[in-house]
Image: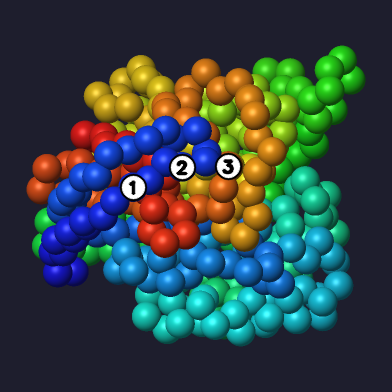
Amino acid sequence: MMQKLIQVLGFLFLLGCKTGQVTATQVVTKSDFTITFGSCNKHDLPNLLWDDIAATNPDVWIWGGDIIYADTDDMVKLRKTYKAQNEVLGYKNLKGKVPVIGSWDDHDYGLNDGGVEFSAKRESQQEFLDFLDVPKDSPRRAQEGVYTTHDYDTPGGSIKVIVLDTRYFRTALTPDTETKKRNTPNKYGEGTILGATQWQWLNETLSTSDAAFNVIVSSIQFLSNEHGFECWGNFPHEVDKLKNMIATSKAKGVLILSGDRHISEFSKTKVDGLDYNLIDFTSSGLTHAYSKFKEESNPFRVGEVVSTESFGVLEIDLSNKEVVFKMLGDGGVVLGEMRESY
């Protein structure tokens, strides 16, 4: 992959999403590999971001889940909705130029907040893989769950994208009967998000990775854990398990991308055994956002929540082991930005 030097010169005005006023600035970003990603996309709503995504000259587009809103066990309806998404002009143009990968979440899986109990998950998996143009003879077709890895080699090192499936094996949530929140964390040790086989695969994937950066794609948030909606925090033992696995694997530059929430935010924490911060970058949604968002506790949040339509960008500098994380809105406006060293 040829090294890219992206130079952006522009004016950022007062934004209506709590980011404050930013004065005119020139931003020069060196990127050896650029990732774009997003989630929560309705094919029948205007998506004003496809041209902005293409303008970042990405090396890959990653779906973070809720690619479509089908919520069905009718495969004819599911197939028809995926087909309609493929015909959206902006997406069609992007797909013709940029590799597209990703995972699903509940609304493209087929059952709202659904997990292991969804009766049509095997059939839905095949429709999802058809949408992503996964070859018919791919091992991914025969396994249970859509998890996989993608490796990208550059002169400065490799990038490994680790796509998780947080739906196929996820056991029951615990409804919150004491507050107005939807869910409360399970008792420690009860239930699973990934299931035994996927956990074993993930451990082996991280432990054997020689990539300079390992990007984990999780449809649901990993760090933010107090809002009561779906998140890893509903299975606290699984959170600890992944943190420990990342640390003991010695995999380099591990970071997490998530979606689902119809807001975008950066979350950060220290993990014992890691010499860098663990980042969970949430980007959501593409066609509809939580515009009435006012307040929500997240002890790991960095900066402000973005509650307008946006997508995520990661500009990876392999020589300096740095990543610039950006939330971009319509017109390429920078709604949030963070830089981390690894």
Mark 1 or 3, nearer chain start: 1
Neighbor class of circle 3 (other Cα within 10 Å; few <14, some 14-19, many 20+) is many
Q: Which mark is residue 12?
A: 1
Residue at 80 percent of width and 36 percent of height: 172
Q: Nearer the viewer, mark 1 or mark 3?
A: 1
Question: Where is residue 136 drawn, in percent x and y?
Answer: 57, 82
The residue located at (69%, 38%) in the rendering is 292
Q: In which image quadrant can residue 179 be found?
A: top right
- Residue 171 percent across, percent down from the top left: 75, 39
Disc 2: which residue: 15
What's the distance in space between the residues labelled 1 and 3, CA to CA? 17 Å
- Asked if one can make out residue 243 in the rendered structure from this viewpoint, the answer is no
Q: Determine the residue positioned at 37% across, 20% down.
A: 270
Question: Which quarter of the rendered picture does the N terminus lie within?
Answer: bottom left
> What's the CA distance linking mark 1 and mark 2?
8 Å
- Residue contact between numbered discs 1 and 2, judged by CB atoms under 8 Å: yes
Q: Secondary structure at mark 1?
A: loop
Residue sitting at x 19%, y 60%? 6
The answer to whether marks 3 and 2 mark residues whose Cβ atoms lie closer than 8 Å is: no
For label 1, the crowd category at 10 Å Cα-Cα, with few meaning under 14, some 14 to 19 and many 20 or more, is some
Residue 228 figure quarter: top right
Question: On screen, 316 above or below 1?
Answer: above
**Residue reaching furthest to the right:** 177
Q: Badge 3 is on which residue?
A: 307
Against 128, residue 331 (above or below) is: above
Q: Amino acid at mark 3?
A: Ser
**What is the three-letter code of the residue carrying label 2?**
Leu
Three-letter amino acid code at the position of disc 1: Leu
Q: Nearer the viewer, mark 3 or mark 2?
A: 2
Residue 288 in the image: above or below residue 231: below
SS of the residue at dot 3?
A: loop
